Structures are given as C-alpha cells and as structure tokens.
C-alpha cells in the first residue's frame, strides 16, 4: 500500500510528456487520444488540457462529459487511470490561466 497515494501518483503524472484522454462518441463507444501532458493540475482530481474548440473531442465532451485519463510510466511499466467528467472551459479567466505563447 502506498503511504501517500496522491503524492506518488501526482509525481508520476508530472514526469510524463503524454497523457491519454478518452471521451464517449455518439454511439456510446470510447475514443482515446494521446495529448501533451496537462497544462495544469490540481491534485489528482482536476486537470487542464488545451485543444481547439472545434475538435471532435470537445464536441464529444459537450454531448457526454464522461471521461478518463491515463498516464503511463513506460520505464517502470506502470500507470494510473482516472475517471470522471470533463468540462469545456472557454471563459477569459480559464484561458489566461493556461494560455502559453504560440497558442491560437
């Protein structure tokens, strides 16, 4: 048993360059996509990613917010899957919080 599971999982997540996100399509099937690591995280319950609002993934989350995230440490062949809901944020405060030079 891990002494501090949240800290251990958070440390592993922070070292990964790729995250796998899943959404549910209009037929109820899971869709998984590799993305760059989250721009920001709050513990292991809130993650902020960026993508174009015209993307298929955004449309799927708007229809069905069920989501999962998977982070894999291939060096030690271990990973963590987290499930929950996704919310599409488009407000100015959220954009300012995670915006980086070069984003469009």
Image (cartoon, rainbow, N blue to C red):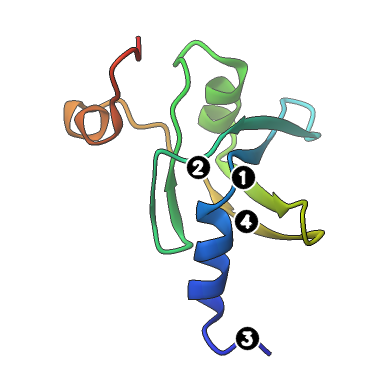
Q: Residues within 10 Å of mark 3 (few under 14, many from 20)?
A: few
Q: What is the spatial separation of the Cα atoms under label 2 and label 3, in whole angstroms?
A: 27 Å
Question: Would you identify the image quadrant in which residue 55 lies?
Answer: top right
- Residue 7: mark in rendering: none
Label 1 belongs to which residue? 67
**First in residue order: circle 4 vs circle 1:** 1
**First in residue order: circle 1 vs circle 2:** 1
- Residue 86: mark in rendering: 2
Residue 14: x, y in percent? 50, 53
Q: Residues within 10 Å of mark 2 (few under 14, many from 20)?
A: many
Task: Say which residue appears at 50% left-offset and 64% top-offset.
Answer: 10
Task: Say which residue appears at 82% left-offset and 59% top-offset.
Answer: 77
Task: Say which residue appears at 56% left-offset and 55% top-offset.
Answer: 13
**First in residue order: circle 4 vs circle 3:** 3
- Residue 83: mark in rendering: 4
- Residue 2: mark in rendering: 3
State the SS at label 4: strand
Residue 34: x, y in percent? 68, 31
Q: What is the spatial separation of the Cα atoms under label 4 and label 1, in whole angstroms?
A: 6 Å
- Depth check, mark 1 against mark 3: the one in front is 3
Contact between labelled residues 3 and 1, with CB atoms less than 8 Å apart: no
Q: Count the labels in the image.
A: 4
Left or right: residue 64 versus residue 101 is right
Left or right: residue 77 versus residue 1 is right
Q: Quadrant of the C terminus?
A: top left
Residue 49: x, y in percent? 45, 35
């Amino acid at each position: 048993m891990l002494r501090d599971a949240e800290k251990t999982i958070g440390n592993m997540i922070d070292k990964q360059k790729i995250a796998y996100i899943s959404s549910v399509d209009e037929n109820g099937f899971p869709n998984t996509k590799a993305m760059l690591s989250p721009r920001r995280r709050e513990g292991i319950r809130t993650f902020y990613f960026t993508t174009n609002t015209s993307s298929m993934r955004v449309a799927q989350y708007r229809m069905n917010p069920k989501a999962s995230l998977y982070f894999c440490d291939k060096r030690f062949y271990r990973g963590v899957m987290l499930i929950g809901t996704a919310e599409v944020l488009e407000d100015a405060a959220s954009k300012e919080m995670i915006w980086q030079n070069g984003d469009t």
